[in-house]
Each structure stands twice: as structure tokens, then as C-alpha cells.
Amino acid sequence: MSVVAIKGWSVEQMDVPEGCNLILGQSHFIKTVEDLYEALVTAGPQLEFGIAFCEASGPCLVRSDGNTPDLVETAVANAMKLRTGHTFVILLRNGYPINVLDRIKTVQEVCRIDAATANPLQVIVCETDQGRGVAGVVDGFASKGVETEEDVADRRHLLRNIIGYKR
């Protein structure tokens, strides 16, 4: 068995446009970008999205698709920052990850979801002689304390009256 040395680490800041959410995950096949498109385009007529997929063999291109050009462009820019094998970046507008995660997870070639967020997102990337991979993510900010009764009331108000997820 040979030992592989890590050449380096980097932290890549993802661009999450105002009003958007980003989903980061890993897959294993060139048709991922097409299958993710099909999963998302049927999620609702209002959903706008862009997809970028880092191919990990052959020409090793960033493949892309989507129904909104600015989101496709930003997803591709994020993928080019990462350049990590078989990683996909999805940007959503007019919808939330909760609306599409089950669809994405049922795409046959999807292996895992690393993040689904509207928060600032940093991706920890490691590099070897072979290539680059996602080692982890930093989603948002560190916890500052434990919620109070007032915070519970605010959370419930947000879910029930602002977002409309709970009744």
C-alpha cells in the first residue's frame, strides 16, 4: 500500500447571491448535470436554478445546465473555485432546499449532500498529486448561545407566519 501525501489545503468561499440557496454535493457520473436538471425543473414552475458539475475523468470539464443564466454562471464560477472531483453546485432562487432535497437525493448517481444553505459557505478543499476533494464545509457562523423563550417564540413566528412552513 502506498502513502499519498496531501499537497495542500485551501478554503474556498462560495458565492451565494442574495435571495438564493446553495446545495453542494457529490455524485459519480457524467449524466449528473442532466439528471439534476430533470429533478429540479419539475419541482415547481417558479423555481429558478443553475447547476455546475465537476467532471472527474476524461476531459475533466465543468458541466452546466439550468433555467436561469445568471445562476448557471455563478454555479460554474463556484465549481471552478472548487475544481473537486464529481462535485456539484446548485443555486436556487424562488424555492428552498427543503423543497428539492428529496428529489436530489433520489437521483441515482448522487452520493451525498455536503451543504444546503443560504448562509455564507466556505468549502475546505484538500489537494493531492491526483486531484482535489471536498474535506468539509463551514456553513454560516459559530453558535453564540442557547435560545431563550423569546427566541423560541421568534422561531415559531418565522416558521408559521413569515415562511409558512408550519401552521
Image (cartoon, helix red, strand yellow):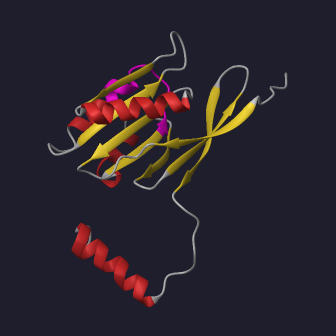
Residue at screen point 35% across, 46% down? 17
**Vertical order, 87 against 157 (above or below):** above
Quadrant position of the N terminus in the picture: top right
Q: Is residue 104 left or right of residue 115?
A: left
Query: Furthest residue to the top?
Result: 58
Q: Is residue 31 magenta?
A: yes
Task: Please state the horizontal and vertical placement of residue 116, each as a whole percent of the image.
Answer: 43, 50
Q: Is residue 43 left or right of residue 142?
A: left
Task: Please state the horizontal and vertical placement of residue 105, each as a whole percent of the image.
Answer: 40, 42
Q: Is residue 46 left or right of residue 73?
A: left
**Vertical order, 54 against 57 (above or below):** below
Query: Furthest residue to the bottom?
Result: 149
Query: Furthest residue to the left?
Result: 45
Of residues 167 and 162, the one nearer the viewer is 162
**Vertical order, 1 against 119 (above or below):** above
**Vertical order, 2 against 140 (above or below):** above
Q: Is residue 11 magenta?
A: no
Residue at screen point 18% across, 45% down? 44
Residue at screen point 21% across, 44% down? 47
Q: Is residue 167 left or right of residue 135?
A: left
Task: Please state the horizontal and vertical placement of residue 89, each as a whole percent of the image.
Answer: 43, 36
Q: Inspect this view and state whether residue 108 appears.
A: no
Quadrant position of the C terminus in the picture: bottom left
Q: Inspect this view and state whether residue 18 appears.
A: yes
Task: Please state the horizontal and vertical placement of residue 18, each as a whole percent of the image.
Answer: 33, 51
Of residues 41 and 80, the one nearer the viewer is 80
Give the extent of the magenta segment.
Answer: 25-36
Residue at screen point 47% across, 17% down? 61
Report which quarter residue 134 is drawn in. Answer: top right
The tally of labels here is 0
